[in-house]
Image (cartoon, rainbow, N blue to C red):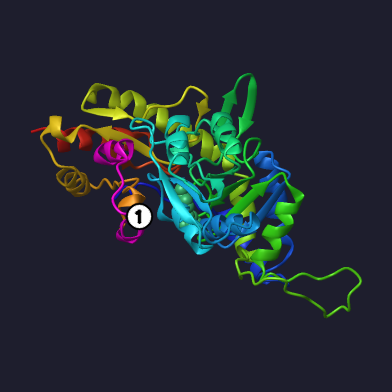
């Protein structure tokens, strides 16, 4: 079975974990700082704060910004649940932005429209998601957010390794030139894996300090205090990433250039193999400024034209050993959010959802697997 994504764990990754297990610290230890430093350097940020998972990273970002009950946070509807849920963890309202139907990304137009629905609430943060690995138009989104009194927090688990060019400036996702923070996840399907794991990057030392405090119970140790002393100005969480997993993350991060090159090569092979299936099957559209390391190989399928339901296609692929997944069901449609905010009309999100299907993409795939997947897809779509 070819899953839609999976980790690549090698002997040296296992050795790195074994070494951490033999060390003095299973949790807060030297690998934590080493992983954070290496990650910050890799993406070009000043600070990186490791945490329990990508959801904790988003929650910590909301806490660091001091997002309060009654505030508003804008998130796109096409994303994983956690992007929206983090606002609810701190009592803020989620205003769902629509996405472009062909990129799946929040755009300046859909953000402006969402800002129009914020009303009297204080808009504190806008969370663009770099869906599949392609980047949203950060400078324009940052300008709109800034004019509305808010900052960007990039939810970037799909885009580790992605580069982009705005004007003449080459940038890397996570360098946070346009945003207050960017969040990452090291779930097994993401570009590097620690099992559970997350990271927040920022260039602001005050935000970095708040992230660290809230990651560990809200405890602070005032300078010059007694050696046992700690104080808690406000309660935080235990969102630490153990030394064992940071050792794995550090080992995985060294492989990012190889993993990224492999993902790019597989995506290019898919591009060629899928071309004959147009116009029924198209790739998601790549924005001009984006040079992605794709996390997901998402295609947009005109199921109506094919005369096949998505369920039939998913089951036919599975019967041929090909896994697939839908990224994503619009979050605004979840029962919890419909109960809170009623039914929203987000046509771009609906059009994306109606057509999207993610095919297998991970570094361990063989070149021949791409042909296998595309042949299975062609067969599943043919009458
Ligand atoms: C994976 C992911 C998350 C959550 O990360 P976890 O580590 O699973 O908590 C959040 N947002 C997006 C866009 C993701 O892909």
- Relative placement, left or right, of 241 versus 155 is right
Counting from the top left corner in percent of width and height, residue 289 is at: 52, 24
Residue in the picture at 28% in, 40% down = 350
Counting from the top left corner in percent of width and height, residue 121 is at: 51, 51
Q: Is residue 117 magenta?
A: no
Is residue 233 in sight in this rendering?
yes
> In front here: 16 or 185?
185
- Relative placement, left or right, of 282 versus 311 is right
Q: Residue furthest right?
A: 224
- The residue indicated by pointer 1 is 341
Residue in the picture at 20% in, 32% down = 302
Crowdedness near tag 1: few (<14), some (14–19) or many (≥20) residues, C-alpha within 10 Å: some
The span shown in magenta is 335-355
Which of the 4 quarters of the picture holds residue 167? top right
Q: Main secondary structure of the magenta part?
A: helix
Which of the 4 quarters of the picture holds residue 28? bottom right
Q: Residue furthest front?
A: 120
> In front here: 263 or 286?
286
Residue in the picture at 46% in, 55% down = 93
The quarter of the picture where the C terminus appears is top left
Is residue 188 in sight in this rendering?
no
């Amino acid at each position: 079975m070819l899953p839609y994504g999976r980790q690549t764990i090698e002997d040296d990754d296992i050795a790195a974990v074994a070494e951490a297990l033999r060390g003095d610290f299973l949790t807060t230890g030297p690998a934590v700082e080493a992983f954070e430093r290496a990650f910050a350097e890799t993406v070009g940020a000043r600070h990186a704060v490791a945490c329990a998972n990508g959801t904790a990273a988003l929650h910590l970002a909301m806490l660091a910004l001091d997002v309060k009950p009654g505030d508003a946070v804008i998130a796109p509807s096409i994303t994983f649940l956690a992007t929206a849920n983090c606002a609810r963890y701190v009592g803020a309202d989620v205003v769902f932005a629509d996405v472009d139907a062909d990129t799946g990304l929040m755009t300046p137009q859909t953000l402006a429209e969402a800002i129009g629905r914020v009303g009297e609430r204080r808009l504190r943060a806008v969370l663009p998601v770099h869906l599949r690995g392609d980047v949203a138009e950060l400078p324009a989104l940052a300008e709109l957010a800034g004019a509305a009194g808010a900052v960007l927090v990039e939810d970037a688990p799909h885009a580790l390794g992605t580069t982009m060019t705005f004007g003449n400036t080459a940038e890397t996702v996570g360098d946070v030139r346009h945003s207050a923070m960017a969040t990452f996840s090291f779930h097994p399907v993401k570009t590097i894996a620690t099992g559970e794991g997350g990271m927040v990057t920022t260039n602001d030392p005050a935000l970095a300090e708040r992230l660290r405090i809230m990651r560990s119970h809200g405890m602070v140790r005032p300078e010059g205090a007694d050696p046992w002393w700690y104080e808690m100005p406000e309660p935080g969480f235990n969102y630490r990433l153990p030394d064992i997993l940071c050792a794995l993350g550090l080992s995985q991060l060294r492989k990012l250039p190889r993993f990224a090159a492999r993902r790019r090569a597989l995506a290019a092979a898919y591009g060629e193999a899928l071309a004959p299936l147009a116009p029924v099957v198209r790739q998601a559209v790549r924005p001009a400024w984006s040079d992605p390391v794709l996390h997901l190989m998402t295609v947009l399928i005109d199921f109506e034209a094919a005369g096949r339901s998505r369920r039939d296609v998913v089951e036919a692929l599975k019967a041929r050993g090909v896994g697939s997944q839908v990224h994503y069901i619009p979050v605004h449609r979840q029962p919890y959010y419909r109960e809170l905010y009623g039914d929203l009309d987000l046509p771009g999100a609906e059009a994306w959802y109606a057509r999207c299907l993610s095919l297998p993409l991970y570094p361990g795939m063989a070149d021949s697997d791409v042909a296998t997947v595309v042949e299975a897809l062609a067969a599943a779509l043919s009458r």
